[in-house]
Image (cartoon, helix red, strand yellow):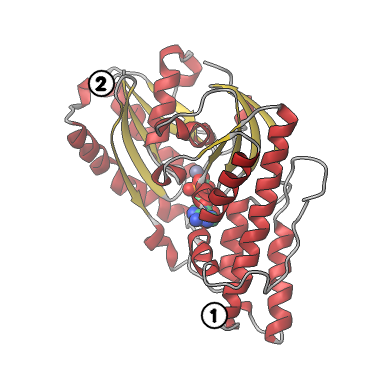
Amino acid sequence: MRVLGIETSCDETGVAVYDTDRGLLAQALHSQVAMHQDFGGVVPELASRDHVRRVVPLISQVLASAGMELPELDGIAYTRGPGLAGALLVGASVASALAYALNKPAMGVHHLEGHLLSPLLSNPRPRFPFVALLVSGGHSQLFEVAGVGRYRLLGDTQDDAAGEAFDKTAKLLGLPYPGGPALAALAEKGKPGAAKLPRPMLGSGNLDFSFSGLKTAVLTLARRESGDASPSTLPESRKADIALEFQSAIVDVLASKAIAALEATGLRTLVVAGGVGANRELRARLVREMKAMGGEVFFPDLEFCTDNGAMIALVGALRLPSAHAEELGFSIKPRWELTSLAAP
Ligand code: KG4
Ligand code: ZN
């Protein structure tokens, strides 16, 4: 079965074809980062318009590199949610129109299920059951994953997501959007231990997170040192110290809670998904910790950590064969809980 996947939930237009026998056949991505950079964040209306411009040429490009024609597709998967409503509508409309013309099914899939299952695109693949740490721009969650569609929420953020904390703190320090990669790059120049920030909820006794206080702690620290000026006026080397400490704080909390989730469930396999999963410090720390506990950790390849069409095509391929009528209709869900999904 060959499924076209279309991702348009936020600021990346992603398209891919996944074959259930041969794996990923082709994929293409257009990132809107440069377009939104002047505004310091994603402008929803600009995002939708850019998806409109990019999606059809990307579909042609992906089919050409897969050596396929449209009628050879067995179905089309698009991101139904969560995400920006206008942006989601672009993918839903294009997928539904194509499906209608080809007389093939179109299925709306959950963006976070795409992230959660994206390590299945890599080799070796994790085997169910596992604990998943889902850390993206909008989510910081721990799940027990028993199989496709069998997700139990173990912990969640009470306020900002990890990626959001990276983005907001980077902005405070005067770094460009998206802040995560920029802040991580700056942190490489910092001196370990030269700044001190809290580890929110580290000893909370549960698997929940809270990251908004960390951003405030950075602001307070930077204001004290800069004589109340904006943190972005601090010398570059001091910003690097703060960036390093900020990243260490997030990594400490994410890693400890992920390990605690494994201990609580008795599982020994951890999967890390979502944009923050691209963070090198987080990866290195989890590799070390999992080795020490005799477990295994899986990360999606870097290109599948952030938003992409491949993970949407993959979920479509896993779910289309047993899709119910209500999963096939045209709809978007800008807000949508992952735990509301059923197994296929
Ligand atoms: O999963 P994703 O591409 O989009 C959402 O569904 O949210 O995640 C984007 C988030 C952004 O907040 C970005 O700053 C963060 O992932 N991110 C990183 C890194 N690369 C991307 N955060 C920390 N370190 C990175 N290397
Ligand atoms: Zn995402």
Task: Give the crowd class for mark 1: few <14, some 14-19, many >=20 residues within 10 Å.
Answer: some
The mark nearer the N terminus, 1 or 2, is: 2
Residue drawn at x 82%, y 49% is 203
Q: Secondary structure at mark 1?
A: helix
C-alpha separation, residue under disc 1 versus residue under disc 2 = 56 Å
Mark drawn on residue 236: 1
Left or right side of 272 for 293 = right
Residue drawn at x 52%, y 24% is 127
Left or right side of 314 for 340 = right
Q: Amino acid at mark 2?
A: Leu
Q: Residue 223 location in percent, x, y?
A: 70, 79
Q: Residue 140 location in percent, x, y?
A: 63, 44
Q: Is mark 1 within 8 Å of ligand 1?
A: no
Residue 201 seen in render: yes
For the N terminus, the image quarter is: top left
Q: Residue 329 location in percent, x, y?
A: 45, 22
Residue drawn at x 55%, y 22% is 128
Mark drawn on residue 102: 2
